[in-house]
Image (cartoon, rainbow, N blue to C red):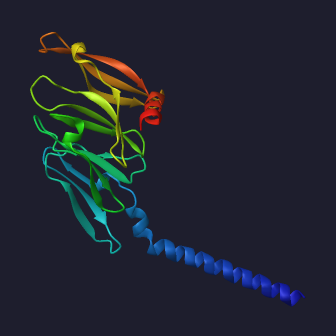
Amino acid sequence: MAEIKKTRVKILLIVLVLSLAAGVYLAYVYQDFLVEEVISDGQINYQPEESLSITRTGETEEEEIRLLSDNFPSPPRISPDRSQLTYIAPRQWEGIGSLYIYDYSSDEIITLLEGQDFGDQYTPKNVWWLDDEYLLVLEGYAYGTVTVGGELQVVRASSGEMAELVGFPEEDRMEIMDLKYLEDEEIYLLDIAHFDEEFLEYEVIQAELEKDYIYTVIENEL
């Protein structure tokens, strides 16, 4: 009986050692693949008003430069889980741009929304990730020297479905210029341009947008 127990212990130890060795081997074999799943800041090469590219490393550990846009791209935004990035191209004065998503795992560039999806002579002007599934997109009139911003939309990243979050009637003479997320308070601070009656000058005012309100809009409209 004692010999049988010793044999069982030996077998158990051998199984454990083999399992550990197999785990180490698989981790080594798939190390490049695991690293490949997320985007690091150092992989991105952004040349303002020129080009946007990303450096990829394959299973052979050889680096490959993947050009994402050479058409006046906006600064890229990496998703919270770092699996995707989004950008606008072209983003330039008096130009109509499109909104793109690049999926790192599949190495696929997706045209999520084109300029015509935002309305006549409107274009996406800025974009941010709300979370891994939704984007906040600033859209506005593309032409003329007066417009400095526009309206804020929430967009489903997988389909391009949109819902308006913040917009103003024309008579209010206001446009959203920028936003900043205050993580501790879970609110977005909006910079809003308030124009004079001649639309020659404006002052910047601020307003708060609660994150919970955004998810309420998503639940009801998307």
User: Residue 137, how many percent across, how many down?
Assistant: 30, 36
Q: Could you tell me which residue is drawn at 19 percent across and 41 percent down?
A: 115
Residue 204 position within the rendered picture, expressed as x and y whole percent measured from the top left: 25, 17
Quarter-wise, where is residue 105 in the image?
bottom left
Q: In this image, 174 relative to 38: left or right?
A: left
Residue 117, placed above or below residue 60: above
Residue furthest top in the image = 197
**Picture layout, residue 131 above or below residue 52:** above
Extreme-right residue of the structure: 1
Question: Residue 122 or 95: which is nearer the viewer?
Answer: 122
Image location (x, y in percent) of residue 133: 41, 45
Q: Is residue 172 above or below residue 79?
A: above
In the rendered picture of this protein, how many numbered marks are placed on residues? 0
> Residue sitting at 56 percent across and 74 percent down?
23
Q: Position of residue 142 (x, y in %)?
A: 14, 32
Q: Is residue 85 left or right of residue 125?
A: right
Which one is nearer the viewer's eye here, 32 or 177? 177
Residue displayed at 79% across by 84% down: 8
Q: Quadrant of the N terminus?
A: bottom right
Question: In what quadrant of the picture does the C terminus appear?
Answer: top left
- Splitting the image into 4 quarters, where does residue 20 fall? bottom right
Nearer-the-camera pick, 131 or 40: 131
